[in-house]
Image: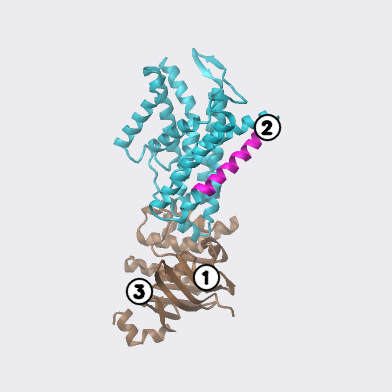
Chain colours: A cyan, B brown
Amino acid sequence: MLTQQLLNGVLSSGIYALYAVGFTMIFGIMGVLNMAHADFGTVAAFAVIWTVSAGLAPVEAVLAASVITLLVALLVERLAMRPGRRFKGDAAIEMPLIGTIGAGMILQNAAALIFGNKAIVFSFNMRAFVRVGGLLVSKGLVVSLIVSAVLLALLEFLVNRTDFGRQIRAVAQNRNAAEIMGINSERVILVTFAITAALAGIAGCLVGLSYGLVSPYMAVSYAIKGLVAMIVGGVGSLPGAVLGALLIGVVEAITVSQFGSQMRDVGVFVVLMAVLAVRPSGLLRVAASR
Amino acid sequence: MTAALSVRGLRVAYGAVTAVRDIDLVVGADEAVAVIGSNGAGKTSMLRGIMGLAGASAGELLFNGASIAGLRTHTIARCGIGYVPEGRELFPGLTVKEELQIGGRFLPRAEQAVKLDEAFELFPRLRERQGQITRTLSGGEQQMVAIARTLMSRPRLLLLDEPSLGLAPVIQDVVYAALASLRQREGLPMLLVEQNAHRALNLCSRAYVLELGQIVRVAESASLRNDPAIQAAYLGN
C-alpha cells in the first residue's frame, strides 16, 4: 500500500514540478510572484477542449491552444506585471502580486462562464492503469512524468548551457548590469515569461490527460502546490523546485494513504512549515542573491 | 575628427533634486579625459545620465557623431560605449569566465576566444580565477572582472567610474597599469571619473573639474597638477 502511494507520489510530482519551476523562474528573474501562473494551465486545457470541439485535428488544436495560451499570458504580463516594473521598493512587488491574483480570478471565472462551473472531460485522456509487479501504474501519470522530465532537462540545458540562459541568469542577478552589458532585459523577461507560461500550459494539459477532467478552478490547488514546492526547494532554484515537487508529491501520497484524501494538503503544509523552521532559505538555497 | 563623445547641456535629476546641470564635455577620438571632483559632486550621476541609467536626464549626447540621447541603456552599450560602474555591478552567481562571456556575447565565436585571451593577458589573475564565482573574489579581482568584461565587448569608448575606489594601493597600481596599457596599445578613448585625482591626472591628458553638479574648470592635466587651488582641493598638497 505504501509502495503504491509512493509510486503515485513520484508520478504526480512531474506536473507539480512544471508549475513550481515556472513560479521560481519568474520570481528569480522578476523578483515578483506571478499568482496567475497556474491559471495558464487552465487556459491551455480549456483552449484544447474548445479547439477540439470546434473540429480541429488534434495537432492543429494543440497548436491553436498554444497560441491562445501564449497570447493570454502576454496580456497578463503586459497588464498585471509590467506596470509594477516602473516602480521601486514595495510597490514593485505588491502591484504585480495583486494584479496577477486579479488576473487569475478573471481567467478562472471566464472559464467558468464559458464552460460551466463543474469539472469537464478533457479532450484526450490516458486514465487507464497497467499492473507492474503488483503495483497499479497510471499511464497518464507516467506520460506526464516523462514529458516533465524531458522539459525540465531541456530547461536546465537552456538556462545553464546557452547564451540565452546566461542572459536569463544575468538579468535575474543584476538587471542594471545586464543592461550595461547590452542585454535587453525587457526582452529577456518577456521570453522567460512566455517559456514559463508554456510550461504551465503543458502542465494543465497533462492534468487533463492524467486525470481525465479539468476544472475552471483547478489552478488554485496547483498554484499552492507549485508555490510550496518552490519555497521548500529554495526560491529561485530550478533543481530545488523539482526536489520540492518530488517531496510534495510523495508526502501528499503518504498522507492520503495514512489519513485519507481529505487530509491531502495537510502533509504538504507540515513539510512547508518544517522546512521553513529548519532551513528557511529552502533545501537547495540559491547561490546568487539579487 | 569627430569626437568620441560630445555632451552638451546635460542635466540629471532625481525627482526634484538636480544632480548635475549644464554639463558640456568632449572626449576626443583618441583621448583619455578625466572628471575629478569631491564626493557628491555629481560625477557618477553624470555617467549614469550618459548611459541612460539616471532617473531623468536632458541634453545633447553624441557618440561618434550620432545621437544617443533617450536611448535605452542596452542600446547605448550596443552602440559601443563600455561602462565600468562604481561598485563593479557584477553578476554575483556567475563565474569569471561567464562574466567575460556575457561581455563578448555579440562577437563571433573565434573573436570571443581572442578577446578572452587578451583579457587574461591584461589581468593574469583572472585566468587563474576563471572558474570562480565572482561574489567570492576580492574587491580588486572584482574590479578587474568589471573592466575585463567591458573590454570583451570591444567598446569604442570606455566610461570608468571610480576604478580605484576601495582598492589597496598595490591593486590600484595593477588596475591603472592595465588602463595605461590599453591607452598605449589601442588608443581607446576613455572618460574616467575618479576621486583619486593623482591617478586620474596621470592617466589622462585633460580633465574637467566638477563641483556641486557643474563643471567649473577644464584644462590640460599638467596644468591642473601645477595649480595650487587644485593641489589643495584634490591632490592633498
- Residue B141: x and y in percent read 39, 60
Do marks 3 and 2 both belong to one polypeptide chain? Answer: no
Q: Which mark is residue B157?
A: 1
Q: Amino acid at mark 2?
A: Val
**Which of B221/B61 is in front?**
B61
Left or right: residue B164 versus residue B185 is left
The answer to whether one can see residue A228 in this image is yes
Q: Residues within 10 Å of mark 2 (few under 14, many from 20)?
A: few
Q: Please state the extent of the stretch shown in magenta in the rendering.
A: A60-80
Badge 3 marks a residue whose secondary structure is loop
The residues bearing labels 1 and 2 have C-alpha atoms spaced at a distance of 52 Å
Question: Would you name the residue on which mark 3 appears?
Answer: B196
Q: Earlier along the polypeptide chain: callout 3 or callout 1?
A: 1
- In the rendering, which numbered label is found on residue A76? none
Residue at the image point whose x is 47% and y is 45% from the top: A99
Q: Position of residue A44 (x, y in %)?
A: 58, 35
Residue type at tag 3:
Asn
Chain identity of mark 1: B
Mark 3 closeness class: few <14, some 14–19, many ≥20 residues within 10 Å = some
Name the one closer to the observer, A124 or B36.
Answer: A124
Q: Which residue is mark 2?
A: A59
